[in-house]
Amino acid sequence: MLELGLAYYWGRGVLQNFDQAVALFQQAARRGNAEAQYLLGKCHQLGQGVAQDFVAAYAWFNLASARGHAAAGQSRQELTRLLSPEDVVRGQQLSLQLEKDLLTAAPPPEPTPSPR
């Protein structure tokens, strides 16, 4: 999903389509993929495939950063300088809601084969 999303984002082998890239990034992000979460933050920050929304960008960067994505942490810090304190709080609240949604929507674990 992430690789195909990147292909649509950059227009590599397919026509560039930010809407399709965002849809694929969302699928990967819901599975806990930090790179996809970071890229969703970028899309929200730049208004690519979604309406420009710095609060949503902050939330996605926050999730990716919590999973160890260094660039996401840097991007979140940069946005913090642009956002009001109230918007930072809104971004943190949205991040918590997204995390909760990720946990409840997580696919079930792969079944373990029974010994024969």
Image (cartoon, grey):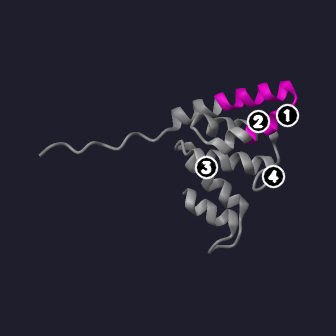
Q: Earlier in the sequence, mark 3 or mark 1?
A: 3
Q: Earlier in the sequence, mark 4 or mark 1?
A: 4
Left or right of residue 48, residue 2 in this image? left
Label 1 crowd (10 A; few <14 / some 14-19 / many >=20): few
Left or right of residue 48, residue 64 in this image? left
Label 2 crowd (10 A; few <14 / some 14-19 / many >=20): some
The residues colored magenta run 75-96
Specify whether residue 88 is painted magenta: yes
Q: Amino acid at mark 2?
A: Gln
33 or 82: nearer the viewer: 82
Residue at the bottom extreme, as displayed: 13
**Main SS, magenta residues:** helix
> Mark 3 falls on what kind of element?
helix
Kindly identify which residue carries mark 4: 47
The spot of residue 113 in percent (x, y) is 23, 45
Instruction: Answer whether labels 4 and 2 touch (C-beta < 8 Å).
Output: no
Kindly identify which residue carries mark 2: 77
> Mark 1 falls on what kind of element?
helix
The spot of residue 53 in percent (x, y) is 81, 42
Instruction: Answer whether labels 4 and 1 touch (C-beta < 8 Å).
Output: no
> Mark 2 falls on what kind of element?
helix
Kindly identify which residue carries mark 1: 81
Q: Earlier in the sequence, mark 3 or mark 2?
A: 3
